Amino acid sequence: MASLAPSASQRWHNWVAAHPVGGLAVIGVIATQLGTYFGYVFPAVGLPTLPWPMYNGALALGINGPSWGSYFNPDFTIAGTNAGWLFFSGQALHFVNGIVFAMLFGIFAHHAIPVKGHVAKGLVYGVIMTIISAGLLVPYAYVAEQGYGLFLFEGPDGWKLPAGILVWHLIYGWFIGMLYQPKDNA
């Protein structure tokens, strides 16, 4: 019986099966790029923009927590002077993260998540990543000491920032579930 779930082409799945490491790396790039695009256009649906590459670049350059304010001075001269480093270091870290998390999904999580269906496994993985991101990384690394609180509900966007982080990771999880579908584990 044919699956009711949408699937990428058989040729794609055969290529991923023949190239497991490279396949997961490409899947990580695709899922990260598409999630990132949607994160930039979230204001169209009332959610805050999620510029993960900028946040990662700020961390890489040591600009986080209380130092955000001094970096984005009123005329943006400091940010403008460092924009290239902020962008390229952030993009590099962001895509490395996306690739590594896709590989972790394929190596460990896909087999361990106790639900049926590849896309469902990807969505569950996205929820797990949301809990880590909104519960730990964003409040304690990206916006440390700024009063956002656990899971970010005390920030200026209220429920919208955690909702945006959830939607972002569900998009990422949906794409890795769609594109990574090994025959040995449904």
Image (tube, helix red, strand yellow):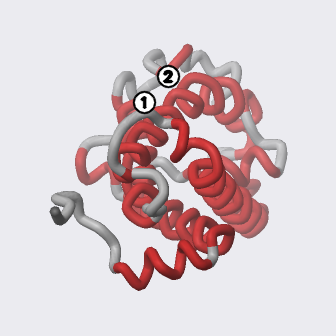
Is residue 152 among what the camera can see? yes
Across and down, in percent, residue 138 comes to 61, 32
128 or 155: nearer the eye? 128
Q: Which residue is mark 1?
A: 162
* Label 2–label 1 contact, CB within 8 A: yes
Q: Quadrant of the N terminus?
A: bottom left
- The label number, if any, that marks residue 152 in the structure image: 2
Q: Name the secondary structure under disc 1.
A: helix
Q: Is residue 152 above or below residue 41?
A: above
Amino acid type at image mark 1: Pro
Q: Is residue 65 above or below residue 59?
A: above
Residue reaching furthest to the right: 62
Across and down, in percent, residue 114 comes to 43, 33
Residue at 48% x, 57% y: name it.
184
Is residue 39 among what the camera can see? no
Residue at 82% x, 50% y: name it.
61
Give residue 17's quadrant in the image.
bottom right
Residue at 78% x, 64% y: name it.
85
Q: Is residue 45 above or below residue 112?
A: below
